Amino acid sequence: MKWKLLFIAIIYIALARSATGQSSVESAVSRLVLSISNCATAACQTAIQEQLNLIAASQNITIGFQDLNECNQISRGNCSEFADCINTPGSHDCVCRSGFVDESPSLLGRVCTDINECQNGSADCLPTSSNAICTNTNGSFICACAVGYSGDGVTSCSDVNECALGTSKCFNASGCVNSPGSFSCTCPPGFTGDGFNCQNIDECSTSNPCFDANAECIDAEGTFNCRCKTGFTGDGLTCTDINECNSSVSLCSAKENCVNTQGSYFCSCKQGYEPFSQFGCFDINECRRSTDTCPSTSTCTNTDGSFECVCTGTCALVDECLTNPCHSNATCTDQTVGYKCQCKPGFVGTGLSCFDIDECSPPVTNDCHAMASCTNLVGSYECACASGYHGDGTSCFDLDECADKVSVGCDPNSVCRNLPGTFSCSCPVGYTGNGSICTDIDDCAGSPCLNGSMCVDQVNNYTCQCLPGFSGRHCDIGKRMGKFVLTTFCGMHSLLLQQTNRRNAPTPPPCLNNGTCVDMLDGYRCVCLDMFTGTNCGDRVNMCDSNPCLNNGSCVNLNTTYNCVCTDGFTGTNCSEVSPCPWRTPGVLFRRPMPVPNVSQLSQRYLRV
C-alpha cells in the first residue's frame, strides 16, 4: 500500500512540474510524500490517499487508483480454501480458520492444514476406555459413543441393554444376555442355531432317547415325548408287555392256543388240529390218516381234536414218545390216550414243527436294555451294552466320561458335560478353543487400567493395581491428599512440585511457555505453541530453521517471527517477488525518507507507460 501511494504521489509531482503555475500543487504533494514515508498504519495510508485524490480532483488530474478487493476475486487472493480472506487497503490478509494450522512456506494463509484433535489430545471426547470414539473432520472433530453404547461421547457413554429394549432380534427373549457394549443370543433347550435363527432339534431322528426299548419317541417343538408301543402299557419311561392271552384282547378260537409275545401274540392250532388257509383250524382225522397210535387189538375212533382207541381184545398202554414223534426242538409228553408235543422255550410251533423265535426282531421278545444290542441265537439271544454304557446287557448304566475328562481328550480347563452314552467338552467363559484345547483370553489386552496402573489378567476378569492416590476398578478415581486431589498426570505433576517446594512459591505447570497439558493413559504430553518445542515446550523454535527466505535471501531470527534480507532484484516477505523498483537498495525493507527522483528520469520511466 505504501509503495502504491508513493508511486501515485511521484506521478502527481511530475505532472505538476510539467505544467506552468503548479508550484503550490508540487509543494503540497511533496509534503505528502514525506508523510507517506513515516506512515505505518492502514488508517494513515488511507487518509493520505484521500488527500491525493482531492489534489487530483482540484487540478482535473484523472490518474487515480481504487482499492481492489482481492477477496471478491475467483482466486480469493490465493487464500487456502480453509482460510478467511480479509481485504485491506491496497492488499489483503489470509487467516487460517479455527481447527487448521498455517503451514504456508511464505505468505500466511496459503496452506492451511487440518489439526487432528483426536491425535493430539485436544479433543474433549471421552477416552476409548470409556467407550467413546473421536472422529476427526476438516477443522473440527466429532465425539460419539461406540457401537452398543449411547450418549454424547463427551460427558457419558452408557451401555445399551438390547435385551431390555427388545432390539436384539434374538430367537427368544429369555435367550438374550446383555454384555457391555453388546449382547449374545442362545437357543432354548431343544433348539439349535446361532441364537438368532433356531431350529427344532428332532431328538427322535438320531437315537431313541426313550430308555425303554418298548417305547417310541414322538418329536415335539423344542422337546419330545415317550409313548409305549402297541402291545405295551406304561408311562413311556417304563413299558410292560400286555398279555393278550390273559385278556379279552385275544381273538384265538377254541381250537387254537394263544401264544403271548412281547408286545403282541399269535394263535396256533392245538394238537389234533391243523390250519386250513385263512379259515382257521380244522380237526385232523388221525384214524383215516393212520397217524393214530391205537394197538392192533383196538379200533381207532376219531374225535374232535383227537382220537380214541376202543379195545376189541386185550389192550396195554403204549408210550408213544418212545418213537420221538415230536420235533427235535420240542418236548413229548405221553398221555393216557396219545401224546402231547410242545416246542421248547425260544421256539414256536405245533410241536411237530418248531421254528426259532428271533427275539431281536419286532415284535421284540427279549429283555435287553434300551441301550443294549441284541444278537439272536438258536433258541435264545444275547444282550450287550452299547458304547458309552456298562452292564450285563439287561441292565445298562451310563458311563460318566467326565469323571476323568483329561483321559478322554478334554482340556483340564474345559467344561465337560456328560451325556447319555457320550460327552462333550467346551471352553468356559474367559477361554477360547474347541474344548480339547482351551487358551485363557488376555483380558488386559484392551489396556483397561488407567493412570499408569498395572493390569493383572485373571480368568474372565482382571484387576488393576493402582498407583498411590488412585482407586476404583480402573484406577480412575483420585483420592484426596491434603488439600489436593490427584486425578490426572498433569495435576499430579503440579502436586509433586508443590509438595517439594518449601517456599510455597507459585508452582509452574508441567508444560512451559503456555503449552497445553494433555493427560494420556500412561502420562501426559504437551501441545506447544508454534514458536516452542520440546517435551515440556521449553525450547524456543528458531524461525529460520525452515529456511523461509528464498532466492538466497538471508534470514534474521526474531524469536516469534523472522525477517528476510533479500538479494538484489527480489523483494517480499520471503524474497519471492521480483523487485519493481530498480533504485531500491538490496536488503533494505524500508527507507526513511525516500528521496524524490529526478523529474526528467521519472517522466521518461513512468509517463511513457
Image (tube, rainbow, N blue to C red):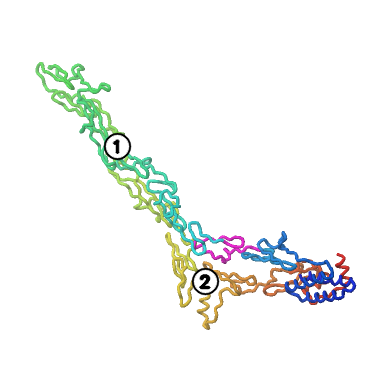
Q: Residue furthest right?
A: 20
Name the mark nearer the viewer: 1 or 2.
Answer: 2
Residue 136: say if magenta: yes
Give left or right: position of 546 versus 268: right
Q: Position of residue 244 (x, y in %)?
A: 23, 33
Residue 531 versus residue 94: which sits nearer the camera? 94
Question: Label 1 vs label 2: CA separation?
Answer: 78 Å
The crowd level at tag 2 (other Cα within 10 Å; few <14, some 14-19, many 20+) is many
Whether residue 327 appears in this view of the structure is: no
Q: Give the residue at x 32% y 47%.
A: 398
Q: Give the residue at x 15% y 24%.
A: 319
Q: Please tell me the numbered disc located at residue 333.
A: none
Q: Quadrant of residue 268?
A: top left
Q: Position of residue 186 (x, y in %)?
A: 41, 50
**Which image quarter is the N terminus in?**
bottom right
Helix, strand, or loop for circle 1?
A: loop
Give left or right: position of 513 versus 173: right
Give the mark nearest the N terminus, 1 or 2.
1
Q: Give the residue at x 27% y 31%.
A: 356
Residue highlighted by disc 2 = 489
Q: Residue furthest bottom?
A: 503
**Mark 2 residue type:** Phe
Q: From which residue to which does the magenta span run? A: 112-141
Q: Residue furthest front?
A: 58
Residue highlighted by disc 1 = 229
Whether residue 551 appears in this view of the structure is: yes
Q: Position of residue 539 (x, y in %)?
A: 63, 74
**Which image quarter is the C terminus in?**
bottom right
